[in-house]
Amino acid sequence: MTLIVRGYKTELKLNNAQRTACLKHAGTSRYAYNWGLRRYQEERAAGRKAPTAMSLHKELNALKQGELSWMYEVSKAAPQESLRDLEHAFKHFWKRCAKKQQGRWRGKLGYPRFKSKKRGIGSFRLTGAIHVGEDWVQLPRLGKLRLKERGYLPTTGVHILSATVSERAGRWYVSLQVEEEHAEAAIALGETIGIDLGIKALATLSDGRVFGNPKALGSHLKQLRRLSRQHARKQLGSKNRQKAARKLARLHAHIANLRQDTVHQVTALIVAKTKPDQQRPTCIVLEDLQVSSMVKNRNLSRAIADVGFAEFRRQLEYKAQQAGSLVYTVSQWEPSSKTCSWCGWIDEDLTLSDRLFHCEACGSVIDRDRNASINLALKAAG
C-alpha cells in the first residue's frame, strides 16, 4: 500500500446566507494576500529582511484588535493560508530569478500580483475540523454545506488535509485535499501505444483509434464574440453590465469544462485502468511538445491553445502511474510524421498540409497522424 495525496472537487448547493459567508471568507483571503504583498514590498524597500508568513500572520492578528475587527467573522484559517500562498509565491519567484541568471529559465518570472476583485471573487482554503457526509461537507465557521453530487467525496478511510472553496461563473465549488492509501498497481502487460496529438484529431493512436477534437473554443467563438461585444457596450457600473459579465463568464466556464471533460474521457480510455493487465498498455509514447514555441505560429496559435496538450500529458502521466503503465516521451525533433512506419524512408518535403504519407521507397500510403503514432510506438520498442 502506498500513501498518495489526491484532490476531490465537486459543486456546492448554497443558500443565500451560506453564499454571503463564502463571499466574506473569499474577501478576507484576498485582503490578507494584498496586505501581505504590500508589507513585503515595504520591508524590501526599507532594506530589511523579507517577512515570513508566520510573522505577517502575527502582525495581522494584532490589527484584528482594532481596525480589522471584521476579520473575526470568518475562520482564522482563511487569511493564514492566504499568507502562506504569498510566501510560496515569492519563494518560487526568487527560484525562477536564480534560474534566469543561470540561463536555465525562459519566459515570465511570475512576480506575485495584486488580487483585484474585478478578476474574480477568488477562493479560500480552510484547515482544521472538516467532516464529510454522503451529500454534505462541514467546514469551520461555515457549518454543513449541501453538495450537488451525492456520494462523490470520500467519507471514510482518508485523512483530510484541507478544503478549498472557490467560485466560478456564479457557481461555488469545494475541493478536498486528502491522503489515502492505494494498493500498488499491477504491471500492465498490454501492447505499447503511440499517441500523436493534433488539432484536427485530439489523439491518433497506433492501434487505429482516433479521438476527435471538440474544438471547445472554436465551436463557441461566434457566441463568445457576440457576448463580449454586448458586455463592452454596457455602461460601466450598471446592472446590465453585471448581467452581461455573468453571461460571458458562464460561457467561458462552459468552454473550459468541455475541454476538461474531453481530456479526462480520452486519457481514461487510453489508460484503461479498470481493464485486465493484458489489456492495459505497457508503455504509452508521446512527443515532448513545446507548446510555448508552437503557439508562435499566428495561423495555428488559437487552435493549439484550444486543445490543451499540457493538460492531456499531465492527466495521462498520473493515470498511467495508477494503472501500472509507463509514459515515455520522444523529442519533438524526431521526424515521426516524415518517416515511413514500414521501411523507414524519410520524406523531407512533407508539409503540414499533406494529410497522407506516400512512401516512395515501399509505396505504402497511410494517414500521416497514424503513421506518426506507429513510429512513436516503434521508438519505445526499439
Image: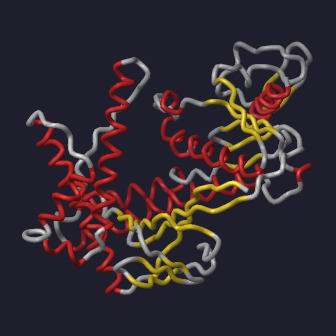
| 26 and 225: which is toward the camera | 26
- Identify whether 68 is placed above or below 318: below
On screen, residue 103 versus residue 358, left or right, reads left
- Identify whether 124 is placed above or below 283: below
Expressed as whole percent of the image width and height from the top left, the position of residue 134 reads 60, 83
On screen, residue 214 versus residue 168, left or right, reads right
| 137 and 250: which is toward the camera | 137
Q: Quadrant of residue 183?
A: bottom right
| 76 and 350: which is toward the camera | 76
Expressed as whole percent of the image width and height from the top left, the position of residue 307 reads 57, 45
On screen, residue 145 versus residue 123, left or right, reads right
Q: Quadrant of residue 233?
A: bottom left
Expressed as whole percent of the image width and height from the top left, the position of residue 38 reads 15, 48
What residue is shown at x 89% (from left), y 44% (from top)? 189
- Identify whether 107 is placed above or below 52: above
Q: Quadrant of the C terminus?
A: top right
Expressed as whole percent of the image width and height from the top left, the position of residue 275 reads 85, 57
On screen, residue 143 versus residue 237, left or right, reads right
What residue is shown at x 56% (from left), y 82% (from top)? 133
Q: Quadrant of the N terminus?
A: bottom right
